[in-house]
Amino acid sequence: MKKRMISILLTAAMMITAAGCGSKTQETAAPDSAGTAETGGEETAESGTADAASGSGSDLIVYTQKTMNQYFHVALQEKVEEAVTAAGFKVEVANCNNDSTLQNDQFRNFISKGPKAIIANAVDSDALNDVANDAVKAGIPVIMVDNPASTAVVDGSVKFDNYECGRMAAERIVEALTEKNGSPSGRLVNVYGAMSSECWRLRKDGFESVISEYPDIEYIEVPGEGERAKSQEALTNVIAKYNGEIDAVHCPSDDPGLGCAEAMQIAGLWYPVGDEKHVIFVTGDGEPDAVRFLKEGYYDAIIVEDAYAYGPIAVDLLTQYIFQGETIPTSGTYTNEDYYWKTAEFMDGETGPVLQVPPYALDASNVGEEGHWGVAALEAEGQ
């Protein structure tokens, strides 16, 4: 099992973004596997496509990408490409730049090519249902990663426990507020993400499930839509409204979180942990710029979603199960040696088999340990 690392420069990410919504194809061959599955119980095929798909003569696996404007998704795409080519298949990618209508069109175009499989990261969990169902009916295996379809029953979904991610972020903030104020109290701003995304909806729900238990925490929620500029503007407005008197900020993802960081810097609220003027700051995902701020002492914690994991896991599920004419398990444990987290659980979801990757907290106590994707990316850039 090899250690997977990539160097993804933000400037390169922007260059890729500038290329628009085209697609590209590449090919290499060197089979590899990221993890192993210990399964138990009955395995069922909700979509019923495994037998037909396993006989596909195509050597093309396609990936429909939601955006290249965020480092997390740049890393996710490069890992998909690496994993597909390492398994000996051609790969083609289409980026819709957060346009759900365009993503549907690209998905239909992929169906017309008759690929061996489609890997998809939905912009809008509801909008992708019909085309995902069309692919399944055409006998093309579909694996959703990160943001799943909401109702389409597909061959498998590799998703993150976003609800628990939100809960963990809230718990870290409650602990920090208690330490700062002597009790779980203070003014907390949640700059939440776009509600069209199941991921951000669940993070918000998980976050609020914890915060609602603390009546002395003044909870202010403002929409940042998951965008850096909008998140910066939203937090700037709150800072102005309360004359800078805020105790904590939460942003569910690191890219919009950088907008929040910028807002705090401009407002003169940027002080390291331990300083009496420090504003508690917790984000999600684990991107390298956020890791850098964590190392410098300005972030309290990051609840990590492993961008490096989705591509290798998706390809593992295809090669170990679907392409062998088998269905993905609905129970059991997936193990790996490549990432900081070591196990993930298979489960039976409403949209078919699910492998749920767990969140974990990255902070000053463990940032020096091996296996964090954002740390690896930062080190690959020489930082």
Image (cartoon, rainbow, N blue to C red):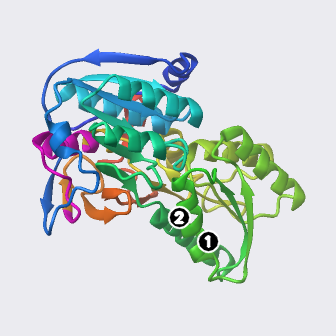
In-front residue for pair 137/182: 137
Question: Which residues fall within the magenta stretch?
Answer: 313-332
Q: Position of residue 286 (x, y in %)?
A: 46, 47
Identify the residue position indicated by label 2 in the image: 166
Quarter of the picture containing the N terminus is top left
What is the secondary structure assignment of the residue under circle 2?
A: helix
Disc 2, disc 1: CB below 8 Å? yes
Of the numbered discs 2 and 1, the one sitting upstream in the chain is: 2
Q: Position of residue 232 (x, y in %)?
A: 73, 44
Question: 45 left or right of 234?
Answer: left
Q: Position of residue 40 (x, y in %)?
A: 13, 67
Question: 245 left or right of 116?
Answer: right
In-front residue for pair 144/155: 155
Q: Is residue 210 magenta?
A: no
Q: Is residue 324 magenta?
A: yes
Identify the residue position indicated by label 1 in the image: 208
Q: Residue at x 49, y 20 (%)?
A: 12
